[in-house]
Amino acid sequence: MNQPAPVAIVTGAASGIGEATAKLLAERGYRVAVADLREEAAERVASALRVDGRDALAVAVDVADEAQVQRMVAQVVEHWQRLDVLVNSAGLESAKPFLDISLDEFRRVIDVNTAGTWLCCQQAIPQMLKQGSGAIVNVSSIAGQKGGGLLGTAAYATSKGAVIALTKSLAREFAKAGIRVNAVAPAFTLTDFVRRQLDTKPEGFVDTIYAATPMGRGAQPREIAAVIAFLASNDASFVTGHVYNADGGTAI
Ligand SMILES: NC(=O)c1ccc[n+]([C@@H]2O[C@H](COP(=O)([O-])OP(=O)(O)OC[C@H]3O[C@@H](n4cnc5c(N)ncnc54)[C@H](O)[C@@H]3O)[C@@H](O)[C@H]2O)c1
């Protein structure tokens, strides 16, 4: 009997790493929910996938809002009757130095990057438990491993370090239930996220980052998507609780 095409939710899929991941998974035969705060942009990505003959659905969601996350998962399961993969790519940057960031700003970064990932996992896992399998890939950051660096600073690094602890905890808790949970830790990746930060930096700043990267360049979003797609796939069937650096050698 033919297996049904796997279903993936990708959050933050209207742009950058999430968008590249949604496209790559769709090319590999997944049915993809393009979930994002920016509804029109998500619809644009989903429509382009449908024009290419893929099965895609745009879903408006603020990952920091529990009711909206619940609705997102319900909508996807109602539409396709299953959920095989969750990619948590929605995220916010915070480039301010520690002494300048207010508690409210810190909380918003944690709400989206950490609590958002937490909520999406919490709502997706019950469906994966029913199916007896599933794969989650959380997008952390090299800043979550090394601490805030040239771009992401303390609030951002704290939010992404917590994502790594969450990833390992869930991997352990749900391993026997057939659910794998991994994280990818990208370094500098050329997306809107990074362009917004570079706008506020002096000229030549990007050269400083490249100089700190053994490969001497930033990543294309597709290069991060390829690692996410591997971790989500059955090729990674014995891999769980792992944080995969996709960083041009930055962590060496
Ligand atoms: N670009 C980098 O250099 C880099 C490096 C390491 C980690 N990351 C991480 O990769 C992930 C994706 O970043 P990107 O570079 O593709 O950024 P991006 O800004 O291009 O895309 C992020 C997407 O998330 C969406 N989003 C933001 N808040 C949301 C919310 N509350 N609910 C739902 N969607 C929301 C945005 O609308 C946007 O479409 C983020 O988690 C980021 O922290 C990026």
Image (cartoon, rainbow, N blue to C red):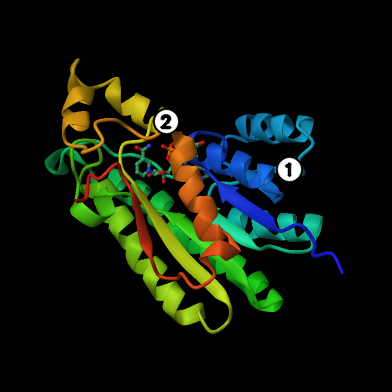
**Side of 47 relative to 119 (left or right):** right
Residue at point 32%, 49% (across, down): 141
Residue 187 image position (x, y, % from top left): 30, 42
**Side of 152 relative to 5 (left or right):** left
Picture quadrant where residue 7 is located: bottom right
**Side of 211 relative to 103 (left or right):** left
Residue sitting farthest toward the left = 99
State the residue position of label 1.
56
Residue 65 image position (x, y, % from top left): 53, 54
State the residue position of label 2.
191
Dot 1: within a 10 Å radius of its alpha carbon, few (fewer than 14), some, or many (20 or more) residues? many
Residue at point 69%, 36% (across, down): 46
The answer to whether residue 60 is visible is: no
Q: Amino acid at mark 1?
A: Ala
Figure quadrant, ligand 1:
top left
- Mark 2 or mark 1: name the one nearer the start of the chain: 1
The answer to whether residue 228 is visible is: yes
Mark 1 lies on a secondary structure that is strand
Residue 128 image position (x, y, % from top left): 64, 71
Mark 2 lies on a secondary structure that is loop
